[in-house]
Amino acid sequence: MDLDKVLITTVVGSFPGKPNKKSMMSSYYEKEDPYLDSLREAVNAQVDAGIELVSDGQTRGGMIEIFAEGLKGFRIKEKIEIISDIEHIEPITLEDIKETRSIIPASTGLKGIITGPWTIVNSVEDQHYDSKMDAVLDTTEALKKEAEILAEYCDVIQIDEPYFSVEFPDYGEECIEKITDLDTKTALHVCGDIEHIVEELVEMEIDILDHEFAANPHLYEVFKDLSFDQRVAVGVVTTRPDTEEIEEIKDNINRAYDIFGPKTMIDPDCGLKNLKKETARNKLENMVIARNVVLNERNRKIRS
């Protein structure tokens, strides 16, 4: 897809949906993947809403569980634990990425989502490593292999590091740049209030920075006087259960464009997994409508 397009619409990643009990039981006896229907529903909802850079919806589980289940070194019981050296054994989300690619229009872009090593390690109980840094560095090496595999099929590889907004380690930049040392475009999503680490984020060799501007509007002022090369994916709708009106979303988009100009991309603040399906769809639909209105209004001003 054309990633230089003005005001590209995208998503952070997750979308509500999982197999019901009947599908799970049926899949057990018929040896079918019960998650394919929820994946297809999530992807089609994005496409139908007009999203131009979609994800697979991450409907198989939480952002930590998906990767803890796929990497060697983790054990999942009542909680997730590290019990041995973390290694990448086989592709984790590749089949879902392939399925997504097969059902989206040729003009629609695809984003591969990988939960970052700092967030993974801080979200589990480590019973193996002597230091958190060793656990994070091994997780980084494992996720690097996953990123290289997904890059063959995706237009963008996005690393999700929500825990950066809580604490940013001295080796955080090193880890992200190791994973994203790819020929494919790369993105870093950090939700929450990132005011205290913005200068570190803009120094990273990443193509797209993705943040929660709708919930943290003061970030516009934080970014306003900075000089940087990355595109910015601006959250213009929140993850709250209410659906924003089109005029409110328009105001957010215009504010973003006034600051970031052609660098602006738009998406929700974060994943929509915890919302009702109808609410998630409505948010995406209103976001696309608002974007189209903004583009039309700005084009008319240029022509006049």
Image (tube, rainbow, N blue to C red):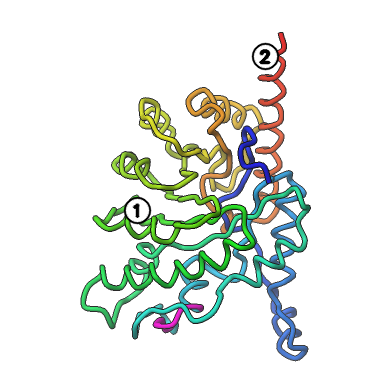
Kind of residue at disc 1: Phe
**Residue that carries the numbered disc 2 in the rendered image:** 302
Disc 1 to disc 2, C-alpha distance: 40 Å
Residue topped by disc 1: 164
Which amino acid is tagged 2? Ile
Main secondary structure type of the part rendered in magenta: strand
**Looking at the image, residue 298 lies above or below residue 245:** above
Q: Secondary structure at mark 1?
A: helix
Is 74 part of what is drawn in magenta? yes
Callout 2 secondary element: helix
Furthest-front residue in this view: 183
Q: Nearer the viewer, residue 48 or 87?
A: 87
Which numbered tag is attached to residue 146? none
What residue occupies the far left of the structure in this picture? 130
Please give the range of residues in magenta. Answer: 70-75
Q: Position of residue 304 (x, y in %)?
A: 71, 8
Residue visible at 66% across and 49% down?
279
Please indicate, yes or no, whether residue 162 appears anywhere in the rendered image: yes
Q: Residue 236: percent from the left, percent from the top?
A: 55, 37
Residue beneath the point at 54% across and 50% down: 185
Q: Label 1 crowding class (10 Å Cα cut-off): few <14, some 14-19, many 20+?
A: many
